[in-house]
């Protein structure tokens, strides 16, 4: 495994041969290396983790709860629309969030995280308030899809990039804690929305969650900071990265996996209702999946810092795909659906938590913002069309047979895992190496 660590004009490189841990001081001077007085974590680092956790709780919690919104829209405001059409709202959120990465990464380098987090908090709170007033399809597309995606991008990328600048040795652990907020939010918001929809109605249910998100954003605006000084931003696209074979193979792997990655989050609730589970129980399954995701985002971080990030990344993606093909495809009652929800949440959550650590492992410190943004921009396009493609497959099979949708999801995840295994071998051909 190769990591860039602070030093006086040097960086340390850790390499592993076989079962032996060999520390080698190979010290090229890196333009993006942290300053000599770099402190792992520190007060600002831990406060950044807190603010990042709360922001991920709010914005990813809403995104992970979109399956709850989709079922509600199918039965109420958008009952004249198909599941595939409604899924465009959720996938548009993801596309705008991810495609904004390159722009926001550049702004992060130039201005730091605070102005971005404050702007994101204002925009996504406003988007939720507008969603609460919406009644037409185009209004949901604009408010919950486009506007919410912009606000989410302004929150997400500063959270993970700022956290990465405060930690080197325990970077995967720190980012995993931040991203675990997404899983916690994904547990809370589906349960909260399901109960509020039926008690105070849709409009006030969304407004109440918007106020919760606003509070989280305010705390994040105060606590999130960068461990690197502001600097002149690099180019919009780092064309040199296109010549880095490891980075490009990894990015392709991420992108292919994203064709299927978010499909279970969108369609599990609908699938459960198609198997004659009650709406309340179906919403609970989404909460179970997000609970599994919370553990998945936390547990592998520390392990990845010890045994290798790629050593965990490709198996987590592969197991996620296998779970779709071996368990979800034949799940027609509560027990197997709950088992799938918990297990898929765990392994896919672990893969998501390792995304940024894998990018940073093969990047210099000064490349982090740009490369994270570039990667998520590539991921945005399959994330946009993945859900609607799955919905089209479902419609082709009559709207009740989910086998095609599930097989499509599992295959995408397995192919993505294969690309990551290739990157692992590109870094170190020893299959047992800590990479």
Image (cartoon, rainbow, N blue to C red):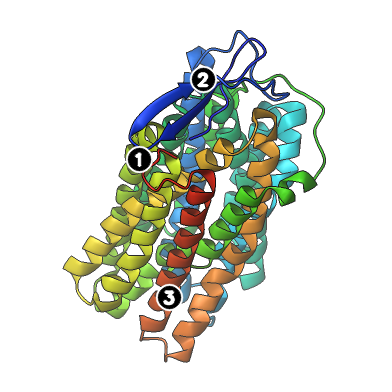
Mark 1 and mark 2 in contact (Cβ < 8 Å)? Answer: no
Q: Residue at x 57, y 77 (%)?
A: 85
Label 1: which residue? 300
Q: CA distance from mark 2 to mark 1?
A: 20 Å
Mark 3 and mark 1 in contact (Cβ < 8 Å)? Answer: no
Is 3 placed above or below 335 here?
A: above
In front of the other: 241 or 287: 241
Mark 3 residue element:
helix
Please indicate whether residue 44 sits to the left or right of residue 174 in the image: right
Label 3: which residue? 75
Q: Residue at x 38, y 65 (%)?
A: 321
Q: CA distance from mark 1 to mark 3?
A: 38 Å
Is 184 placed above or below 278 here?
A: above
Q: Earlier in the sequence, mark 2 or mark 3?
A: 2
Could you tell me if residue 217 is visible in this image? yes
Label 2: which residue? 45
Residue 122 falls in image quadrant = top right
Q: Earlier in the sequence, mark 2 or mark 1?
A: 2
Mark 3 and mark 2 in contact (Cβ < 8 Å)? Answer: no
Q: Residues within 10 Å of mark 3 (few under 14, many from 20)?
A: few
Quadrant that contains the C terminus: top left
Please indicate whether residue 110 sits to the left or right of residue 1 in the image: right
Q: Residues within 10 Å of mark 2 (few under 14, many from 20)?
A: many
Residue 96 falls in image quadrant = bottom right
Q: Position of residue 88 (x, y in %)?
A: 58, 70
Q: Earlier in the sequence, mark 1 or mark 3?
A: 3
Q: CA distance from mark 2 to mark 3?
A: 45 Å
Mark 1 residue element:
helix
Mark 2 residue element:
helix
Is 258 placed above or below 10 here?
A: below
How many labels were placed on the picture?
3
Q: Nearer the viewer, mark 2 or mark 3?
A: 2
């Amino acid at each position: 495994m190769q990591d860039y660590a602070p030093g006086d004009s040097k960086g340390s490189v850790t390499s592993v041969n076989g079962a032996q841990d060999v520390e080698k001081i190979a010290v090229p001077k890196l333009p993006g290396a942290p300053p000599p007085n770099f402190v792992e974590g520190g007060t600002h680092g831990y406060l950044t983790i807190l603010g990042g956790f709360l922001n991920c709780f709010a914005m990813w919690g809403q995104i992970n709860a979109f399956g709850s919104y989709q079922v509600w829209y199918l039965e109420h405001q958008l009952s004249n629309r198909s599941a595939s059409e409604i899924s465009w709202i959720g996938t548009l959120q993801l596309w705008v969030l991810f495609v904004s990465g390159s722009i926001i990464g550049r702004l992060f380098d130039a201005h730091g995280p605070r102005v971005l987090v404050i702007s994101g908090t204002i925009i996504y709170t406003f988007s939720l308030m507008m969603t609460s007033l919406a009644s037409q399809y185009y209004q949901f597309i604009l408010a919950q899809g486009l506007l919410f995606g912009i606000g989410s991008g302004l929150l997400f990328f500063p959270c993970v990039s700022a956290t990465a600048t405060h930690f080197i040795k325990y970077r995967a652990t720190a980012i995993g804690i931040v991203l675990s907020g997404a899983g916690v939010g994904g547990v809370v918001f589906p349960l909260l929305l399901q109960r509020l929809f039926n008690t105070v109605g849709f409009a006030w249910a969304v407004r109440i969650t918007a106020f919760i998100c606003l509070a989280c954003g305010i705390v994040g605006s105060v606590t999130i900071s960068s461990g690197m000084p502001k600097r002149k931003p690099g180019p919009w696209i780092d064309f040199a990265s296109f010549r880095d074979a490891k980075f490009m193979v990894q990015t392709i792997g991420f992108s292919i996996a994203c064709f299927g990655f978010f499909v279970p989050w969108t369609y599990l609730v609908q699938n459960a209702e198609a198997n004659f589970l009650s709406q309340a129980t179906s919403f609970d399954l989404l909460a179970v999946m997000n609970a599994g995701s919370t553990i998945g985002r936390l547990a592998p971080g520390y392990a990845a810092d010890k045994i290798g990030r790629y050593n965990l990344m490709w198996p987590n993606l592969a197991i996620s795909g296998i779970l779709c093909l071996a368990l979800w495809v034949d799940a027609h009652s509560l027990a197997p659906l709950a088992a799938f929800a918990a297990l898929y949440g765990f392994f896919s959550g672990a893969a998501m938590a390792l995304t940024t650590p894998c990018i940073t492992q093969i990047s210099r410190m000064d490349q982090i913002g740009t490369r994270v943004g570039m990667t998520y921009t590539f991921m945005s396009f399959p994330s946009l069309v993945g859900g609607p493609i799955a919905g089209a497959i479902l419609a082709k099979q009559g709207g009740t047979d989910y086998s095609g949708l599930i097989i499509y999801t599992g295959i995408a995840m397995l192919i993505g895992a294969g690309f990551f295994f290739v990157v692992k071998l590109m870094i170190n051909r020893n299959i047992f190496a800590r990479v």
